[in-house]
Image (tube, grey):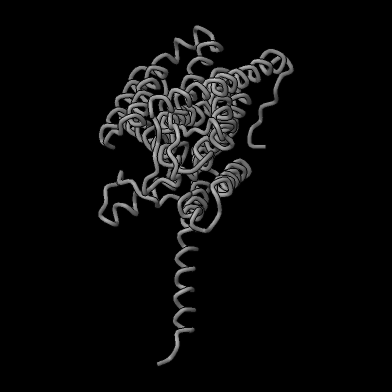
Amino acid sequence: MPISIIFPETYFALHIAKFIEVFVTAFLVSFFLIPPVVRISLTKNLLEGGSKRRVHKKSIPNLGGFAIYTSFLLTTILFLEPSSILKTKFFLVSLIIIALIGMQDDIAPLSPIKKVFGQIVAIVIVLFTTDIQFRSLYGFLGIHELPQVISYIITALIILIITNAFNLMDGIDGLAAGLGIQTSIVMGIFFIFIHAHEWAILSLILAGGLVGFLYYNLFGTKNKIFMGDTGSLTIGFIISILAIQFNELNHSVYFQASLKSAPAVLFAILIIPICDIIKVFIFRVIRGKSPFYADRRHLHHYILQTRVNHFQATLIILLLNIVGICYSFLLDFLGTNKLILIDVVWGFLVVLSPNIYLRLRIVLYKLRHKQTKPIK
């Protein structure tokens, strides 16, 4: 077993009902908020139209992220203890900034530089007003405790990468929300195991709000909606904070858990969004484009070219992500260095396989066409 904690009966008795309650409350807030958001969006013409990089041709409301954000904020205020809210208040302030950036971009698109600048402002607030930091690599490449300046830099990069990874994965129905649900539930269960009550609640609140949104995004007809940048940036930012706490609380003196390879397990949980953003950025730079240049070279775009539909493409990616989550916990005993190597191989195998498959199909088609070409 990668985690050696056994729940005391009193812990279940005191908290399990609350965990269910926060999940259901967040779900209900999101679920019932989306129909009025759709009506307002249609009335005010706040729609996302088809474009070259979008896979939908029809104009659809794209402010579903407002419901996700509101669900998270309201349920957090309702269920966290006042002392816990005080400890997380600057995180919530930063989240407001992130949501406002997303909302502005959904209504009147911002340039990538302005979006990143706003994110950096939110990150700086987190770094200098909270205790949320990535302080140790726990033996990766022989590195343990990090100097303060390096800790700040790595923390800022982690938040920036994960936030934008989820933003860029929001390209087909259910994908960003599905990955967010998987990640937040896995982290929530981990926080429950180590009795990190506040962080377990925040994880389950996010998961509940995303489930409420996912119903309309995947199955909506009258109230079909996208999450927009408001939703994807909100998800990515919250997940990045949870990810840092996942790494740090594993070795905290106040919480006891026995993950030997916390950074590697964390990497595996987020493997597909992270590897996809790295691959896309590298390919854009190689082609002489800006890393922020919008295109259709993400994993989900290539999978759609293999003639599967949106739902099938989302399901494939989510199943592959589950594989990464499962093997990371099962192989935790290998240690950080070995497990991260496996993570890198697996992650890039997943995100590059559709590219390779499609290129091979083109080559084989050309060969067959050449062989069948009549001889003059």
Residue occupying image coordinates x 60% and y 46%:
319
Q: Is 88 on the left or on the right of 24, as rendered? A: left
Residue 359 visible at all: yes
Decide: is 181 above or below 131: below
Question: In terms of image quadrants, where is residue 164?
Answer: top left
- Residue 168, how many percent across, how many down? 41, 41
Query: Which residue is at the far bottom?
Result: 376
Question: In terms of image quadrants, where is residue 122?
Answer: top left
Q: Is 61 on the left or on the right of 129, as rendered? A: right
Residue occupying image coordinates x 59% and y 23%:
27
Query: Which residue is at the far front?
Result: 43
Decide: is 263 above or below 6: below
Question: Quarter holding the C terminus?
Answer: bottom left
- Residue 216, how many percent across, how many down? 56, 32
Residue 254 visible at all: no
In this view of the protein, which residue sits in the foreground, 139 or 199?
Answer: 199
Query: Which residue is at the far top?
Result: 82
- Residue 52, how many percent across, how many down? 36, 49
In this view of the protein, which residue sits in the foreground, 101 or 60?
Answer: 60
Decide: is 52 above or below 38: below
In this view of the protein, which residue sits in the foreground, 195 or 98?
Answer: 98
Question: Quarter holding the N terminus?
Answer: top right
Query: Which residue is at the far right?
Result: 9
Residue occupying image coordinates x 68% and y 13%:
14
Decide: is 58 above or below 77: below
- Residue 147, how many percent across, how many down? 34, 30
Q: Disc count in the image?
A: 0
